[in-house]
Amino acid sequence: MRARDKAAVSALRATLAALDNAEAVPLEGAQLRGAALEQSPVGAGATEAARRELSEPGVADIVRAEATERLEAAAQLTAPAHADRAARLRAEAAVLLRFLEDPGTE
């Protein structure tokens, strides 16, 4: 990918973050409340939690949602002063939609 393709870099970074968040395992709030520092686990890897595995359709759904979010935001930016931002959002959505159309080509 060219270093100058800022729209693609921005879209991919945000989508990778969304995928990373989707793989996170929810913390049990009850375990964290009232826990003293002395009772917390110690050592290398003590705070690591297993990650969820996303299915291919699950990944596609997240990528599609990220593209849709950008298109909807671009549609809201109707003022001429926001034309550049709207164009960038549409370009980011196009990058993501290309991955959905033919995931093997990127």
Image: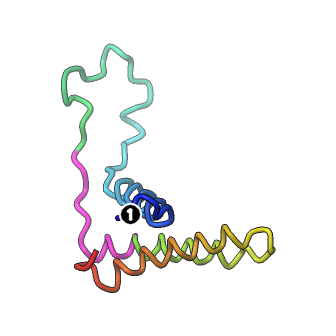
- The C terminus: image quadrant: bottom left
Estimate the x, y position of residue 33 in percent, counting from the top left.
Answer: 44, 30
Above or below, comparing residue 24 to residue 11 in the picture: above
Above or below, comparing residue 2 to residue 67 in the picture: above
Q: Which residues are magenta?
A: 50-62
Instruction: Indicate the amino acid at tag 1.
Output: Arg
Q: Residue farthest to the left?
A: 44
Residue at 47 percent of width and 79 percent of height: 94
Residue at 80 percent of width and 74 percent of height: 80
| Side of 43 where 18 appears, left or right | right
| Side of 40 where 15 appears, left or right | right
Magenta stretch encompasses residue 58: yes
Give neighbour class at mark 1: few <14, some 14-19, many 20+ (Cα, 10 Å).
few
- The N terminus: image quadrant: bottom left
Estimate the x, y position of residue 50 in percent, counting from the top left.
Answer: 21, 46
| Side of 48 where 93 appears, left or right | right
Quadrant hosting residue 55: bottom left
Q: Nearer the viewer, residue 3 or 55?
A: 3
Q: Nearer the viewer, residue 30 or 93?
A: 93
Q: Secondary structure at mark 1?
A: loop
| Side of 78 where 12 appears, left or right | left
Q: Residue farthest to the bottom?
A: 101
Estimate the x, y position of residue 29 in percent, counting from the top left.
Answer: 42, 40
Residue at 48 percent of width and 60 percent of height: 10
